[in-house]
Image: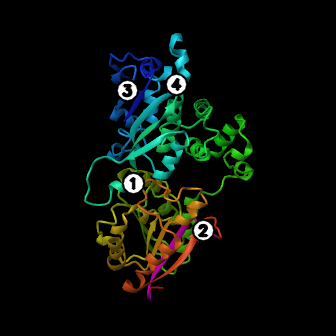
Amino acid sequence: MHLIIKATGSGAGMLSHLLAKNPHNLYDRSDKEARVRIVFTAASDEETEAVIYVTPDPIALVKGNTAHNDITQYINDREFVTSSRFCSYIRPALGTALNGKPKEVFLPWVDHKFQLELSFGPVASNLPDHTIEELFHVLGYELELERGDAVYSFDLKSRSSARYIRLRGEQTLQRALRQLFILIPALDDDKHYFISDDEIEKIRRYGEGWLDSHPLRALILKRSLRFANLIKQFDGEESTPSSEKVAVTPAELSAEPKIRLNDLRYAAIAETVEGLAFKSSIVDFGSGEGKLSARLGSVPGVKQIWAVEPSANAQLRAIDRFSKLEDREGVTVPTPVTGSLFYFDESLRNKDIMILCEVIEHIDEYRLARVMETILAEYSPKVLILTTPNKEYNEVYEMEAEEMRHSDHRFEWGRAEFSEWCMRWTSSFNYSVDFKGIGEGSDAFGYPTQMSIFTKEGAL
């Protein structure tokens, strides 16, 4: 993770004074979480360039994190990407420039607009290229996006969320840094800290003079503050005309919390299972922490539940959840199974019901055919229940056209795509299929979650 600040033209040499760093010395500081180094690769009156490079301690990134119990805690991009962590690491080193308080003799240069080139990355963002471009173009920057030099034999590079960003424009150093300290965490959208009232003050201070007039202000605040009450509190402190504020309706703020979509999915699946004639044995593939499996244990007529999950961490949480069901009368305690859709398990064949709740969208599309063939031909359940997001409904959430609901989703389908894909399997494997919607429906966009129910011919 790095940030390169380059100033050219008359007065470029003042960059080092505003940063309060000697261009002839290496700045090298370490704390318990990261090592921050600043080196000047050029230092003249016409061109000055400072390279800020951060090396986090990979152990410190996960130390004390009790949410993980296996090696998956180490498998992430947090050690490499320019994110909210990066901003927190370099903030002490750039405090003088961010606050605009160099030595008194250099104060007049705080408001001087330099010809700046700002390069940073990699940034792991689920925002599409055109949205990133719009975020910076309106601030007066020319923007270049790069995805590295690696050569692949398949179309992966063009779809990568990791990008390097280079900005060019005329701006004061203080404002340029403040813009980055708001927009870099908004791009990454994975805060490493609890979002509280302190975040409001930081955004208010760093966003002064440019954020209110930004056409994507609502998106920036949504990705920075996340919660409607914090967004409302931010707007309450500002003098922004109401027409420019984030659209947060009074109903959203005063009403009782809505039932979570995940809970609605579980309720819909449980209701479907309860209405089936055969439901003695159930396989819950991709069972995660076991919430759905535990709920199905209370459905009358269910005798056996296999909760199949590849993540050891999730399985440990599921085992703890299932242990609390053991003394409950009339409840079937699920059996945890470590497994995957890509590894055939003979013991799971010919069960009454197989469930894939929000699973298929996490699988590459080209691998789905093999998954469905294995399920319908080899496992051959009497009923197969699938749920997946409805891409059309993302517009209700005011998401960008190319944006997905989760960073791990390989795809998201609209209603027609999902229906066509499901119908493809009915004739080949003697199944019929019905469709239902889950969640709050929209006349134009359908339901947030779409569910298909495959029934084996002659089974019911």
Dividing the picture into quadrants, the one containing residue 274 is bottom right
Mark 3 or 2 closer to N-term? 3
> What kind of residue is marked 4?
Leu
Residue count near mark 1 (Cα–Cα under 10 Å), binned few <14, some 14–19, many ≥20: many
Mark 1 — residue? 315
Pick whichever, 383 or 175, lies toward us.
Answer: 175
Give the SS element for disc 2.
loop
Residue 457 magenta: yes
Q: Residue furthest front?
A: 10
Secondary element type, mark 3: strand
Q: Position of residue 271 (x, y in %)?
A: 57, 71
Question: Residue 445 bears which disc, if any?
Answer: 2
Does label 1 or label 2 sit earlier along the sequence?
Answer: 1
Horizontal placement of 21 versus 211: left or right? left
Q: How far, Cα to Cα, is label 4 from label 3?
A: 17 Å
Which residue in the protein does label 3 denote?
49
Residue mark closest to the camera, 1 vs 4: 4
- The label nearer to you, 3 versus 2, is 3
Asked whether the viewer can see residue 122, the reply is: yes
- Which residue is denoted by mark 4 in the rendering? 98
* Label 4 environment density (alpha carbons within 10 Å; few <14, some 14–19, many ≥20): many
Magenta range: 444-458
- Check disc 3 and give the amino acid type: Glu
Residue 330 visible? The answer is no
Query: Mark 4 or mark 2, which is nearer the start of the sequence?
Result: 4
